[in-house]
Image (cartoon, helix red, strand yellow):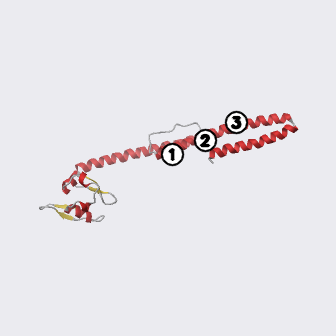
Amino acid sequence: MSLRARAVAYLVVLHLIFAALGAYLLFNNRFWLLAVEAVFVLSLAAGLALSREMYRQLGLAGEGMRLIRDEEFTSRFLPVGQPEVDELIGVYNKMVDHLRDERVRLAEQHQFLSQVLQVSPSGVVILDFDRRVASLNPAAERLLGRPSAAVVGRPLDALESPLAEALAALGPGDARLVGLLGARRVKC
């Protein structure tokens, strides 16, 4: 049973008990019965209105979680006039602004690095965690003698090139000088 259903059930049960008390008063003093029943009806109406407002405010939190889960960082919430909820909305808006700024900053850095790699005279081969070629720049294409479309997704040792075999044999942090055809040497 949801929290909302439990709260409404609590209010209904409480007011049913009060109604039974009212029925008891019906037999003893009819004037008090009318006064007590009027108070109970007002109490039930106020309780339902308060719980509806409370759950409407909690719906904002659920909507915020959905937006974060969907990585939608352009939406912001407006204050609703309740201090506790407005504070939560302020924290959410600040967090979303920070995440959006961080995403833009990372995209700019990625774009800059991509441009540097494209014009770099040094060959750069980027591997994934399975040691397969994830990407390479134009200088690496020239050194390997193959276009990136023929290399990406394949392990280095499957490229049948002395340079690729030397790169595949390297461990993290190792360096090696590899001779290519002619007098050319490449530091890996």
From what the image shows, is residue 83 above or below residue 184?
above
Helix, strand or loop at disc 1?
A: helix
Report crowding for label 1: few under 14, some 14 to 19, many 20 or more residues within 10 A (C-alpha).
few
**What label sits on residue 55 in the rendered view?**
2
How far is mark 1 from mark 3, CA to CA? 31 Å
Q: Considering only order in the chain, which callout, 1 or 2, is on the residue closer to the N terminus? A: 2
Helix, strand or loop at disc 3?
A: helix
Q: Amino acid at mark 1?
A: Met
**Do we see residue 26 in this rendering?**
yes
Is 12 left, or right, of 67 in this rendering? right
Q: Amino acid at mark 3?
A: Ala
Image coordinates of residue 186 in percent, x first then y, are 19, 61
Q: Are marks 3 and 2 in contact (CB under 8 Å)?
A: no
Identify the residue at horizontal 63%, vertical 39% (top origin): 52
Helix, strand or loop at disc 2?
A: helix
Q: Amino acid at mark 2?
A: Tyr
Q: Considering only order in the chain, which callout, 2 or 3, is on the residue closer to the N terminus? A: 3
Q: Are marks 1 and 3 in contact (CB under 8 Å)?
A: no
**What label sits on residue 65 in the rendered view?**
1
From what the image shows, is residue 47 above or below residue 161?
above
Identify the residue at horizontal 34%, vertical 45% (top origin): 108
Residue position marked by numbered label 3 in the rendering = 45
Image coordinates of residue 100 in percent, x first then y, are 42, 44
Q: Quadrant for the C terminus, please.
A: bottom left
Image coordinates of residue 9 in percent, x first then y, are 68, 44
